[in-house]
Amino acid sequence: MVRDHLWAPWRGEYVERGACEADGTCFLCEAWMSKDDRHSRVVCRSASSFVILNIYPYNAGHIMVAPSAHTGNIEDLHGDALRDLMELVQQSVRALKRAYSPQGINIGMNLGRSAGAGLEDHIHFHLVPRWNGDTNFMPVLAETKVISEHLEKTYERLRKAFEEIGRESR
């Protein structure tokens, strides 16, 4: 059986340096502690969770929802922290629908390296908006994924959607 390989050289630096530093901090912890949401690409915060852009998106609007707690185990979240995380996932679906009008949304969490986690030590959900026909010939023939929107534009669209949803829920 011949197997094809998926090449993603842009992830090399990330894989080589690792997502978490020796002192236990990671890019998600740094984003949570950051005072500059635009620079850290945080589009929404709640009491104990936040939404951040994926800087290596599969589609425009690809976001991650993470708890502030640095843990690789979903079993470590309880009560208010778990509820807050799931409510922010739900709010993120609303924001993606408002900002992008997708025909579907993939929601997933990879727990452990063998399950595909690039960042094992800080759990997070991936939310990826999807449209009929959003996979075209480019990945198949040219081994290239075309993202039709700059991250700055994605940030603006989602930040606005979260703000509108927040105002409506008051």
Image (cartoon, rainbow, N blue to C red):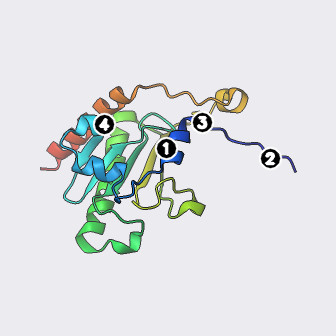
Tag 1 near tag 4, CB within 8 Å: no
Earlier-in-chain disc, 2 versus 4: 2
Name the mark nearer the viewer: 1 or 4: 1
Residue 133 vs 46, above or below: the answer is above
Extreme residue in the front direction: 22
Q: Secondary structure at mark 1?
A: helix
Q: Report the amino acid beneath label 3.
A: Pro
User: Residue 163: x, y in percent?
Assistant: 20, 40
Q: Position of residue 156 (x, y in %)?
A: 28, 30
Label located before the other in sequence (4 or 3)? 3
Picture quadrant where residue 25 is located: bottom left
Circle 1 packing at 10 Å, graded few (<14), some (14-19), many (20+), is few
Disc 2, disc 4: CB below 8 Å? no
Identified at 44% across, 51% down, the residue is 19
- 70 shown above or below 79: above
Q: Amino acid at mark 2?
A: Arg
The answer to whether marks 3 and 2 mark residues whose Cβ atoms lie closer than 8 Å is no
- Percent x, y of residue 159: 26, 36
Marks 3,1: beta carbons within 8 A: no
- Of the residues under marks 1 and 2, which one precedes in the sequence? 2
Q: Amino acid at mark 4?
A: Leu
Q: Is residue 37 left or right of residue 119?
A: left
Residue at which label 1 appears: 14
Q: Which label was assigned to residue 158?
A: 4
Q: CA distance from mark 4 to mark 3?
A: 28 Å
How far apart are the two marked residues, 3 and 2, measured between alpha carbons? 18 Å
Upstream in sequence: badge 3 or badge 2: 2
The residue pinned by badge 2 equals 3
Type of amino acid at the residue the image marks with label 1? Tyr
